[in-house]
Amino acid sequence: MRRITAFLLCFVLIFTLAACNSTPSGSSSTPAPASSAPEAAATPEPTSAPTPEPTETPTPESEAVSGGKTLVVYFSASGNTERVANAIAAATGGDTFSLEPVNPYTNEDLDWTADGSRVNVEHDNEDARAIELTAATVDNWAEYDTIYIGYPIWWGIAAWPVDTFVKANDFTGKTVIPFCTSSSSGLGESGQLLADMAGTGDWQEGQRFQSSVSHEDVAEWVNSLK
């Protein structure tokens, strides 16, 4: 009887242990990992901003010199035109060039009231107006862009010694401004006649001055041309 009871107790014990050790099919003793959180967006590596290439600091362009060099050419019989020419040169900073006849005019030559005086003979005979000058051309002529041409008025036109200079030079690309002196006569067509004679250059209207004109008035006229 005791053997049967002991046998039954052993059987129950073995059965219980077997039940405790058994696990459901497909199960694991290691817990499944929790679902991974989304990866944070990758933080871009800092990149240095591109360094701008150096640029030159703009500098104002130098102003173009309007008119370039200025030359004041003149023939003066009694000094009046020379005085105006010097005033123009002072106002413009230009150079001067005096037209000197090889055979200079005397006071008697210039007496237009005397029959047979030189100026009367030359006026009556156009061929006699071809006055030879000591110099009819200018050194470095190409450097001058603005040319003032001055003369006294003789019989309503430019004193003819100026003609020799005008015919001897090429005024292409130059601005030419005639001026004259007289006690009563105006500029008239003297400037236009010289322009026609030259055939080249940009000839302006010009100005007539009285013999007693002041340097200040001449400078005011020059400044008005700008």
Image: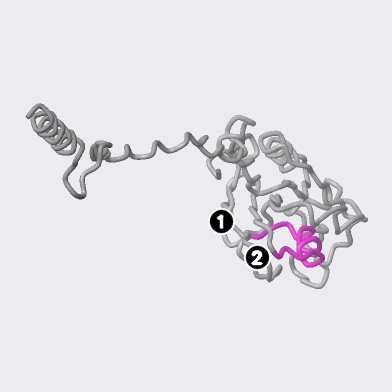
Q: What percent of the width, then of the height, locates residue 2?
A: 10, 26
Q: How is the image coloured?
A: one colour
Q: What percent of the width, then of the height, locates residue 143?
A: 78, 52
For image coordinates 11% across by 30% down, the residue present is: 9
Give the residue type that dot 2 points to.
Answer: Ala
- Tell how many labels: 2
Say whether residue 97 is visible: yes
Give the residue type that dot 1 points to.
Answer: Glu
Q: Under tag 2, what secondary structure?
A: helix
Residue 162 shown in magenta: yes
Mark carried by residue 107? none
Residue 205 figure quarter: bottom right
Mark carried by residue 195? 2
Q: Nearer the viewer, residue 179 or 77?
A: 179
Q: How many C-alpha atoms fall within 10 Å of the one at disc 2: few (<14), some, or many (≥20)?
A: some
Residue 81 in the image: above or below residue 192: above
For image coordinates 58% across by 54% down, the residue present is: 187
For image coordinates 27% across by 39% down, the residue present is: 36
**Alpha-carbon distance for marks 2 and 1?**
10 Å
Q: Which residues are magenta?
A: 157-172
Q: What percent of the width, then of the height, locates residue 195?
A: 65, 65
Q: Nearer the viewer, residue 139 or 86?
A: 139
